[in-house]
Amino acid sequence: MNNLQQLKTIIEEATTKIKSCLTFNELADVKAAYLGKKSVFAEMMQQMKDLQPEDRPAFGQKINEAKTEISDFIDSRRKEIESEMIRIKLEKESVDVSLPGKDIRQGAKHLISQVIEEVEDLFIGMGYSIEEGPEIESDLYNFEMLNLPKTHPARDMQDSLYITEDTLLRTHTSPVQVRTMLRHSAANEPIKIICPGKVYRKDDDDQTHSHQFTQIEALVVDESSSISDLKGTLLVLAKKLFGEERQIRLRPSYFPFTEPSVEVDVSCHKCNGAGCSMCKGSGWIEILGAGMVNNAVLEAAGYDTSRFQGFALGMGIERIAILKYGIDDIRAFYTNDMRFNRQFL
Ligand code: DAH
């Protein structure tokens, strides 16, 4: 067999092997055998020295052409294997559109968040902005600067969870009032804010008590706001939460941070004031506390009380939601039972 015939045979042999390759690994083996360092071609190059010198370049060229041919063929086989693999993969992953779909469970916004947003919408519409503060608070901001010095008996109204002697879990959102006033008093800036957030009391958890609950506080400090502005605001709030027909009633009360202070009742939304089990027969339901900001509080925060005054109100969001939706156990808000949550989609 002369050299050219030998080359032809090698190419044919290689072609057959390449065609029968089914994986990249098999192809790599064939490639090594024909194009690698110890391939048949490498051996043939060794034999070159036996040729006449004038025949050597032509033979060398033939060898190179043969290698190129084999290499091209390997490349095209690689592409074939690749598309075959993709085809098999797609076949395996094909979707049976006749199978029943998975049940997608839609979540619901928590009722507490819904009520907070309802109150926020109302107040933002009246030009208030939202302020937040830390849940771990100092005794100074939570009590002292709100006119509740260390020995004040009214501290008893808010059983507190202390972390150190001077630090506690805030018992109400009112310290956010203090923090905001301290930021604005030096420049004599007015304030119009609401502060939503979690608060904590040392209560035993039962149907009506929770050691953690949610409040929203509102505070206005400026040179003109009067108790009639407070009354107007409370009426709008009551109507927004419990319906346009609602009326409010203010009863004198006591909070150290407001003077005068009031307890706000709303006419019962169940019986329209006639008296029912919801309002315990009185026609009225207590919903929140409010008042004109006590001068002692304004002064402690650095406001000149000969110019500035204002009003504040604070409400428990759970209480509003309980009344509004007839919920009979406060713990339902915290157990994350989807059967409860999904009722208020
Ligand atoms: N901080 C009071 C509480 O948690 C609620 C409250 C009452 C807030 C009257 C106020 C207010 O801003 O004016 O019991």
Image (cartoon, rainbow, N blue to C red):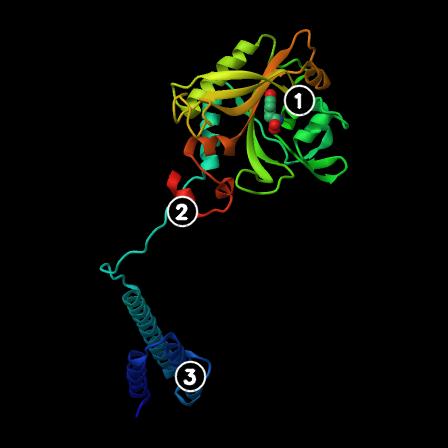
Q: CA distance from mark 2 to mark 1?
A: 44 Å
**Residue at the extreme front of the image, as rendered:** 281
Which residue is under mark 2? Answer: 339
- Name the image quarter holding the N terminus: bottom left
Q: Secondary structure at mark 1?
A: helix
Percent of width and height locating residue 133? 62, 31
Dot 2 or dot 1, earlier in sequence: 1
Q: Amino acid at mark 1?
A: Arg
- Name the image quarter holding the C terminus: top left
Which residue is under mark 3? Answer: 39
Dot 3 or dot 2, earlier in sequence: 3
Front of the two marks 3 and 2? 2
Which residue is under mark 1? Answer: 183
Percent of width and height locating residue 14? 32, 82
Front of the two marks 3 and 1? 1
Within 10 Å of the Cα at label 2, are there few (<14), some (14-19), or many (20+) other Cα atoms?
A: few
Residue drawn at x 28%, y 56% as measured from the top left: 101
Instruction: Answer left or right for 5 relative to 336.
Output: left
Is there any visible trace of residue 342 in the rendered image?
Answer: yes
Q: Which image quadrant is residue 168 in?
A: top right
